[in-house]
Image (cartoon, grey):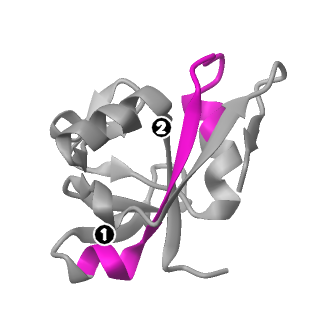
Amino acid sequence: MNQRVFLHLTTKQAWEEALTEGQYELSTRGKTLEQVGFIHGSFPNQLEEVAGFVFAGCTDELVVLHLDIGKLQENGISVRVEDGGNGKMYPHIYGAIPCNLVDQVTPAHMNSDGQLIPSL
């Protein structure tokens, strides 16, 4: 697995608002970077589990932001891979994400069984 590439799941509406502002500042569903101190990320093999925990029951349109640790760090944004409180290591972004540093945005949604269906 490429440990440089990681993902952040958010609502389509939150991403569209970020595009208007020029940077993305939500940590996770319902919490801002300012409230939490970092933006939660996940590696590709963690996305489905994270989605089930954070977006269970969500009917909003979702998108997956594709990010590169090195690219963010080259632009002065601290990214650390840390324990997410469950013994698993997750990327955490310590700063707002300029929208132009997002490599790709793909649609996703939660199905009726509460599973993430990404268009990766």
| Residue 120 position within the rendered picture, expressed as x and y whole percent measured from the top left | 71, 56
Q: Is residue 110 left or right of residue 61?
A: right
Q: Residue furthest right?
A: 113
Q: Can you tell which mark lies on residue 101?
A: none
Residue mark closest to the camera, 2 vs 1: 2
Q: Looking at the image, which residue is at 28% across and 39% down?
A: 18
Q: Residue furthest front?
A: 20
Alpha-carbon span between mark 2 and mark 1: 18 Å
Label 2 sits on residue: 10
Q: Name the kind of residue labelled 1 in the image.
A: Val
Label 1 sits on residue: 79
Q: Name the kind of residue labelled 2 in the image.
A: Thr
User: Which contiguous range is marked in magenta?
Assistant: 51-73
First in sequence, mark 2 or 1: give its number. 2
Is residue 115 a member of the stretch shown in magenta?
no
| Residue 104 position within the rendered picture, expressed as x and y whole percent measured from the top left | 51, 61
Quadrant that contains the N terminus: bottom right
Question: Is 116 placed above or below 45 here?
Answer: above
Q: Looking at the image, which residue is at 30% across and 69% down?
A: 79
Which image quarter: residue 20?
top left
Q: Nearer the viewer, residue 80 or 109?
A: 109
Which image quarter: residue 33?
top left
Q: Is residue 69 left or right of residue 66?
A: left
Q: Is residue 76 left or right of residue 63?
A: left
Q: Nearer the viewer, residue 52 or 15?
A: 15
Q: Secondary structure at mark 1?
A: strand
